[in-house]
Image: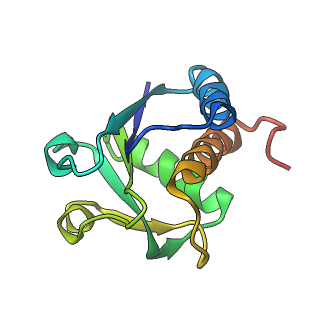
Amino acid sequence: MLSVTVICVGNLKEAYLRDAVKEYEKRLAAYCRFKTLELKDGAPILPHLPERAYRIALCVEGKQLSSEELAALVDSKATEGFSELVFVIGAFDGLPEDVKKACHLRLSFSKMTFPHQLMRVILNEQIYRAFTIIAGSKYHK
């Protein structure tokens, strides 16, 4: 089973955001080993990036993918021998360049900027959607 980790800077302050993240974590348990690693603001990210994982930095200048393309990426990395995918969300000011360079892919969800706390919910939903697409479930229409 594939492991998926979301590394993020800061914690969720609002209960409704925590509830949404927990809901997708619960749903994802059927498809992968999912975990979230919250780092304190200002803490270095690089030491937490697993060497053998496929690493994806979320940044506005990254490549935009459809939900189907993200699902294909997740599926292909599993078949290419990666046992772990890591998504990295920075703080309000984004990710340091050294973290972006350490990642295999820079991914953008939009040309718009989203609050990093809300981005965690959006990312978890899209990871869940990717797995449901791979599984052929009816969640994705």
Tell me the residue at 36%/36% (across/down): 38
Closer to us: 66 or 40: 40
- State the residue lying farthest toward the front: 13
When the figure is inspected, residue 16 is found, relative to residue 10, above or below; the finding is above
Tell me the residue at 27%/66% (across/down): 100
The quadrant of the rendering that contains the N terminus is top left
Closer to us: 109 or 115: 115
* Residue 65 placement: quadrant: bottom right
Q: Left of 7 or right of it: where is 130?
A: right
Q: Left of 78 or right of it: where is 65?
A: right
* Residue 68 placement: quadrant: bottom right
How is the protein colored in the picture? rainbow
- Percent across and percent down for residue 15 are 64, 30
When the figure is inspected, residue 69 is found, relative to residue 13, above or below; the finding is below
When the figure is inspected, residue 20 is found, relative to residue 121, above or below; the finding is above
Q: How many marks?
A: 0
Tell me the residue at 22%/45% (across/down): 49
- Percent across and percent down for residue 98 are 17, 66
* Residue 99 placement: quadrant: bottom left
- Percent across and percent down for residue 57 are 37, 60
When the figure is inspected, residue 20 is found, relative to residue 66, above or below; the finding is above
- Percent across and percent down for residue 133 are 70, 44
Closer to us: 71 or 86: 86
Tell me the residue at 81%/39% (across/down): 139
